[in-house]
């Protein structure tokens, strides 16, 4: 059983039911008890600070001092790039702004927990692209219609190549109009948004590797235009790819110092 802990300042928001899954348990802990991470076996932490960015960042710092290895998702109301960068520098794995994209939140949590399972079973993840790893990052729900599942499988298998909506819709045996409607109804985002989200998540992994540049991250993750990649990356994460890469380097250095 995997444990996801949500650190909240006020009462429990109902939206976190989106994180529920088989073999995943969710608990809620108030900000003042952040140090309790030392006493629990936790696989993923989520910090919901609302508009109180300073309190959220303090909790993030406290968690990382106690458990530098613990992956953390930071959630706040719409905020400045400075807050986003500070969260990344303190060690946040990802950052979400409200109103929440529940699909993206659920998939990010599944990716993080999936990577922890892969690392536990097979050792550290290897560099290079792997469709098996992509599928492990984003497990498909058995509750989705078969036509949507076929389309998602096709996207995952061809994520790093140019994807045409006509071909994706053909996998679902539907017209483009009916396919897009069915996909968004069940997944929560359009097929195009889904593809972009997948590619940006992979680009984040590339940017965390030492010596990787933004152009490599763009083309390796399936974007054919560096300018478009930078624009989409900032729209999705709140920061540019360069700022994200720098923040991840700072986080690794800080965690390394803590471990010493």
Image (cartoon, grey):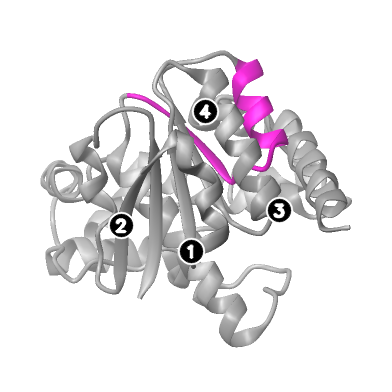
> Where is residue 140 drawn, in percent x and y?
29, 67
> Where is residue 158 drawn, in percent x and y?
47, 63
Q: Mark 2 = which residue? A: 26
**Secondary structure state at the residue bearing disc 1:** loop
**Secondary structure state at the residue bearing disc 2:** strand
Which region is colored magenta? 81-98
- The answer to whether the residues at label 3 and label 2 have Cβ atoms under 8 Å apart is no
Q: Mark 4 = which residue? A: 56
Residue positioned 24% across, 37% down in the render:
12
**Secondary structure state at the residue bearing disc 3:** helix
Residue density around tag 3, few if under 14, some if 14–19, many if 20 or more, within 10 Å: many
Q: Mark 1 = which residue? A: 40
Residue positioned 64% across, 55% down in the render:
67
- In the rendered image, the quadrant that contains the C terminus is bottom right
Q: Looking at the image, is mark 4 or mark 2 earlier in the sequence?
A: 2
Residue 63 visible (yes or no): yes
Q: Looking at the image, is mark 4 or mark 1 earlier in the sequence?
A: 1
> Where is residue 73 drawn, in percent x and y?
50, 43
Q: Looking at the image, is mark 3 or mark 1 earlier in the sequence?
A: 1
Cα separation, mark 4 vs mark 2, equals: 19 Å
| Nearest to viewer (mark 3 / mark 2) | 2
């Amino acid at each position: 059983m995997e444990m996801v802990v949500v650190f909240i300042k006020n009462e429990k928001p109902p939206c976190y039911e989106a994180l529920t899954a088989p073999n995943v348990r969710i608990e809620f802990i108030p900000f003042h008890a952040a140090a309790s991470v030392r006493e629990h076996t936790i696989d993923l932490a989520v910090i919901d600070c609302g508009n109180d960015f300073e309190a959220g960042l303090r909790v993030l710092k406290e968690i990382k001092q106690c458990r530098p290895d613990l992956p953390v998702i930071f959630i706040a109301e719409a905020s400045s790039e400075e807050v986003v960068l500070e969260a990344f520098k303190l060690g946040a794995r990802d950052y979400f702004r409200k109103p929440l994209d529940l699909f993206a939140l659920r998939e990010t949590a599944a990716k993080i927990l999936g990577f922890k399972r892969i690392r536990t079973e097979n050792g550290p993840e290897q560099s290079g692209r792997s469709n098996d790893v992509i599928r492990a990052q984003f497990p498909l729900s058995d509750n989705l219609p078969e036509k949507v599942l076929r389309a998602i499988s096709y996207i995952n298998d061809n994520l790093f190549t140019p994807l045409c909506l006509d071909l994706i819709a053909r996998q679902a045996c539907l017209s483009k109009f009916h396919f897009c409607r069915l996909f968004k109804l069940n997944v929560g985002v359009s097929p195009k948004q889904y593809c972009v989200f997948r590619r940006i998540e992979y680009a984040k992994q590339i940017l965390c590797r030492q010596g990787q540049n933004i152009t490599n991250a763009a083309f390796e993750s399936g974007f054919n235009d560096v300018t478009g990649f930078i624009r989409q990356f900032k729209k999705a994460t709140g920061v540019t790819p360069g700022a994200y890469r720098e923040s991840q380097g700072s986080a690794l250095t800080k965690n390394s110092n803590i471990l010493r």
